[in-house]
């Protein structure tokens, strides 16, 4: 079977930065460590007033096409995943294609364009759609462009405000991919939930504490479902687990849940038995609450073991380095986590080709998906071509007064022209309706 997966990836961050311990915490009267240690975030990426989901997506896609030497004819499908869309009819992919057509002689007349929505998991769903399209043999040798782009902004004063972020991830999905090959098996955990939603409103209504529990419940179900088709996962077989990362503190919880799950019935559980006992088995409990209490107690003991700490440092921590600096990018977030892991491996000069990643995607509303990916031979060149560190370093550091102004500029309910904090350079800019995507 021909390998299908991600051939190339590009990242575009919002051009502004909000420093959480330095600027946000003092203004909120909170201990800076609530953000750096509790949530695990140093900063949020923020869009300048001339940036939006279209410009960020077009900028990421353009960089990807230039680097790979692609023309519009090479692309048979453009899917945009977003939960920040502004048009209920015309998909954001058409706006992005329109931007790109300004800089190429050709156009995307024969590409299938669409938009995917299921909160943050839509980025992975678009990846799956592209994979299925190629596997079905409908691609005529062409690749798919998947763009996950969001301005993940919350109302001022909302508990989620500290986790804001803005950026886009563009991915090229092809046969014989250079970066990672996707597995055929997937596991899902899905249920109708209302802890995070945006019914015809710009900022989400969120029950933050409950959303954390829903994330964990769906992720556990997805892991179980994945194992029912792919067989039991063993920690030694997995190099990294990139999870959807609304903030790294969430992944701290998901990592523990994942570790308990994949060590069950393995020699690792046997090795840990003397120290912390064996994992509670549901069959041994008459009462559901007693079983839950026993699991909680086991998890509390597990997270203090050296074995768990070492596994977390090797398998999960490297997935969080970019997220710590940019916050939640919604649909792009899990793809940023994969990139962080591969970037760390490159910096450590690891030989990763042939190794396995287990990818845990999630979207509120709510659904989790687990699938495996095999790192391909070209991963070093692909990850080595990213300029994300330079982009992050070039961001303008907002003062609190700047932040309030630019947040208002992105709030559709406030008519506030705040000018620009940075000067666009070789990038698409939002210059008012009708002149969207002009390249400066
Ligand atoms: P909060 O209630 O302000 O924070 O916001 P908290 O009081 O729960 O503190 C956060 C953590 O910091 C806690 O750690 C504290 O103990 C710790 P934990 O106990 O959870 O491990 N802490 C400190 N640590 C060190 N020093 C200190 C200190 N103070 C506190 N001084 C909340 C947290 C999640 C509610 C908020 O950020 C929120 O509402 N976020 C938005 C919703 C969200 O991100 N949910 C995540 C799961 S749902 C999801 O991922 C989907 C999503 O991406 C959307 C989509 O799919 O479309 C959101």
Image: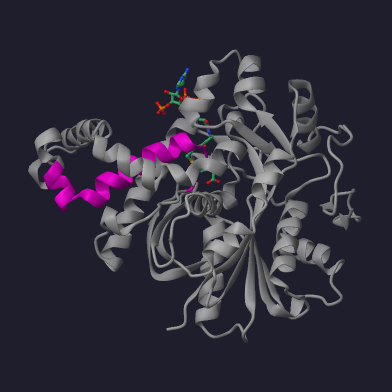
Q: Is residue 7 above or below residue 288?
A: below
Q: Quadrant of residue 111?
A: bottom right
Residue placed most toward the observer, 235 or 161? 235
Q: In the displayed structure, does residue 267 sit left or right of residue 141? A: left
Residue furthest front in the image: 349
Residue at 28%, 34% (x, y): give it: 303
Residue placed most toward the observer, 412 or 336? 336
Residue at 78%, 53% (x, y): give it: 55
Residue at 33%, 49% (x, y): give it: 220
Q: Is residue 68 above or below residue 327?
A: below
Instruction: Indicate whether residue 340 is drawn in magenta.
Output: no
Q: In the displayed structure, does residue 312 sit left or right of residue 431? A: left
Q: Is residue 328 above or below residue 133?
A: above
Instruction: Indicate whether residue 258 is drawn in magenta.
Output: yes
Provide the residue span drawn in magenta: 244-271
Residue at 84%, 38% (x, y): give it: 422
Colour pattern: one colour
Q: Position of residue 7 (x, y in %)?
A: 57, 69
Residue placed most toward the observer, 94 or 24? 24
Q: Position of residue 51 (x, y in %)?
A: 79, 46
- Res 368 visible: yes
Q: Quadrant of residue 6?
A: bottom right
Q: In the displayed structure, does residue 355 sit left or right of residue 55? A: left
- Res 280 visible: no
Most prominent secondary structure in the magenta stretch? helix
Q: Position of residue 177 (x, y in %)?
A: 54, 73
Q: Is residue 199 above or below residue 19?
A: below
Q: How many marks?
A: 0
Quadrant where the N terminus sits is bottom left
């Amino acid at each position: 079977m021909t390998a299908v997966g991600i051939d190339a990836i590009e990242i575009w961050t919002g051009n502004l930065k909000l420093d959480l311990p330095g600027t946000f915490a003092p203004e909120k009267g909170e201990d800076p460590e609530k953000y750096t240690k509790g949530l695990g975030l140093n900063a949020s990426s923020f869009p300048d007033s001339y940036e939006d989901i279209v410009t960020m997506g077009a900028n990421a896609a353009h960089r990807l096409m230039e680097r790979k030497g692609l023309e519009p004819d090479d692309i048979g499908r453009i899917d945009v995943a977003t939960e920040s869309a502004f048009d209920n009819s015309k998909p954001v992919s058409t706006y992005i294609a329109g931007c790109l057509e300004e800089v190429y002689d050709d156009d995307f007349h024969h590409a299938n364009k669409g938009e995917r929505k299921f909160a943050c998991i839509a980025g992975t769903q678009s990846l799956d759609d592209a994979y299925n399209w190629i596997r079905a043999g409908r691609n005529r040798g062409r690749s798919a462009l998947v763009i996950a782009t969001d301005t993940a902004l919350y109302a001022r004063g909302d508990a989620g405000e500290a986790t804001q972020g803005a950026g886009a991830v563009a991915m090229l999905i092809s046969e014989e991919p250079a970066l990672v090959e996707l597995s055929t098996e997937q596991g899902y955990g899905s249920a109708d939930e209302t802890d995070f939603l945006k019914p015809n409103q710009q900022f989400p209504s969120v029950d933050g504490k409950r959303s954390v529990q829903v994330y964990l419940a769906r992720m556990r179900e997805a892991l179980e479902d994945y194992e029912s088709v792919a067989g039991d996962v063993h920690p030694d077989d997995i190099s990294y687990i990139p999870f959807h990362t609304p903030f790294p503190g969430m992944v701290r919880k998901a990592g523990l849940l994942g570790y308990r799950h994949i060590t069950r019935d393995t020699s690792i559980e046997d090795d840990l038995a003397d120290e912390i006992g064996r994992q509670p088995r549901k069959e041994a409990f008459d009462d559901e609450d007693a079983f839950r209490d026993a699991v909680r107690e086991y998890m509390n003991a597990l997270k203090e073991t050296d074995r768990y700490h070492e596994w977390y440092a090797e398998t999960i921590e490297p997935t969080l380095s970019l997220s710590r600096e940019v916050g939640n990018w919604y649909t792009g977030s899990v793809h940023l986590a994969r990139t962080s892991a591969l970037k760390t491996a490159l910096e450590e000069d690891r030989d990763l080709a042939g190794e396995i990643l287990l990818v845990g995607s999630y979207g509120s509303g709510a659904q989790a998906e687990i699938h495996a990916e095999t790192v391909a031979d070209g991963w070093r060149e692909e990850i080595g071509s990213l300029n994300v560190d330079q982009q992050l370093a070039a961001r303008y550091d907002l003062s609190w007064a700047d932040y309030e102004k630019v947040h208002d500029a992105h709030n559709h309910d406030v008519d506030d022209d705040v000018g620009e904090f940075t000067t666009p350079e070789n990038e698409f800019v939002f210059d008012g309706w009708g002149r969207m995507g002009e390249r400066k």
